[in-house]
């Protein structure tokens, strides 16, 4: 798809996540619906969505492992506690192993299950893991930079919120590990993750030796930015995207046999016959 379409869908997903945070599932569901509306096969959308989720999550757990090892060994300065460093590192390694093994487990479940929905879900997971590995093996630097940058810039914003109120920024290792562990609160299905993420971040920062008052002020400021900026950028993008979908529906209805029409997520399509998937 074009950069314009990709940007509108991406910003729309961020807006959805700012309103309904379930570990990012709200935004992924919106993106899947738009692509399905554009005519892409359901199976393709499913395994590509799983691959996207795995690649971005892999960046989180990789940095969690590195941060935990850095704290345990003293390479990254902070609250020098071997246990608080090793536990996140071990957990991260286990998560990576489980994720890589999920493909084979899902394949086995798909072969043995007699339920259609369970079989389809297992197939999507298995194909998604395989797709994620294939994409990573291409060595495309944009994949690695995108997955890592998405998280690291978020961590940097949390650090800036400490500085904004005149407080010392926690050591890099503490900030990194506390951020990733604290984000688990976003799995609680409440609007914007309010309360879940905040409490998780503050509690984890305090556990790693940050002053409770400093942590609370910085996290509240960070969360305010995290909820406001994606909504300010994403809601207008979502409105534009919705208008394009309405216009597209009108064009498809008016398209005569043999004529071409642009379809979001597919490019130019001749009525009943795909022409190209490289255009918008």
Image (tube, helix red, strand yellow):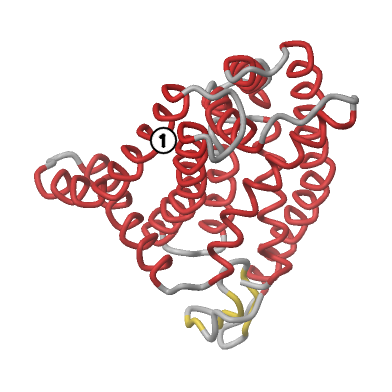
User: Closer to the camera, 113 or 261?
Assistant: 113
Q: Residue furthest front?
A: 74
Residue at 54% in and 24% down: 80
Whether residue 272 sits left or right of residue 43 in the image: it is right
Whether residue 145 sits left or right of residue 247 in the image: it is left
Q: How many marks?
A: 1
Quarter of the rendering occupied by the C terminus: bottom right
Residue at 58% in and 23% down: 79
Residue at 72% in and 58% down: 8
Whether residue 192 sits left or right of residue 33 in the image: it is right
Q: Is residue 190 above or below residue 25?
A: above
User: Closer to the camera, 246 or 209?
Assistant: 209
Q: Is residue 118 above or below residue 107?
A: above
What crowding class fits label 1: few (fewer than 14 Cα within 10 Å), some (14-19), or many (20 or more)? many
Quarter of the rendering occupied by the N terminus: bottom right
User: Closer to the camera, 251 or 213?
Assistant: 213
The x and y percentages for residue 279 are 63, 80
The residue carrying mark 1 is 89
The x and y percentages for residue 50 are 42, 51
Q: Residue furthest left?
A: 112
Residue at 35% in and 41% down: 93
User: Closer to the camera, 212 or 201?
Assistant: 212
Q: Quadrant of residue 41?
A: bottom left
Q: Circle 1 sits in a helix, a strand or a loop, which is it? A: helix
Q: Is residue 63 above or below residue 169?
A: below
């Amino acid at each position: 798809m074009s950069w314009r379409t990709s940007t509108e869908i991406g910003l729309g997903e961020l807006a959805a996540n700012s309103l309904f945070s379930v570990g990012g599932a709200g935004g992924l569901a919106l993106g899947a619906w738009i692509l399905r509306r554009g005519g892409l096969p359901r199976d393709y959308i499913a395994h590509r969505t799983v691959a996207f989720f795995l690649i971005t999550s892999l960046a989180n757990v990789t940095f969690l492992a590195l941060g935990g090892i850095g704290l345990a060994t003293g390479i990254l300065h902070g609250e020098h506690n071997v246990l608080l460093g090793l536990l996140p590192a071990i957990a991260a390694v286990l998560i990576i192993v489980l994720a890589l093994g999920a493909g084979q487990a899902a394949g086995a479940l798909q072969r043995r299950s007699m339920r259609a929905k369970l079989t389809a879900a297992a197939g999507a997971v298995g194909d998604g893991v395989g797709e994620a590995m294939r994409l990573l093996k291409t060595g495309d630097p944009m994949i690695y930079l995108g997955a890592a940058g998405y998280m690291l810039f978020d961590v940097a914003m949390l650090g800036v919120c400490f500085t904004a109120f005149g407080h010392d920024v926690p050591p890099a290792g503490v900030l990194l590990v506390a951020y990733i562990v604290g984000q688990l609160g976003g799995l609680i299905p409440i609007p914007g993750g309010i309360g879940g993420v905040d409490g998780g971040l503050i509690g984890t920062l305090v556990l790693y030796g940050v002053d409770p008052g400093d942590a609370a002020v910085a996290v509240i400021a960070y969360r305010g930015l995290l909820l406001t900026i994606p909504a300010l950028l994403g809601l207008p993008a979502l409105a534009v995207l919705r208008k394009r979908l309405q216009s597209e529906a009108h064009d498809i209805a008016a398209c005569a046999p043999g004529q071409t029409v642009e379809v979001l997520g597919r490019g130019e399509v001749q009525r009943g016959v795909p022409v190209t998937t490289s255009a918008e």
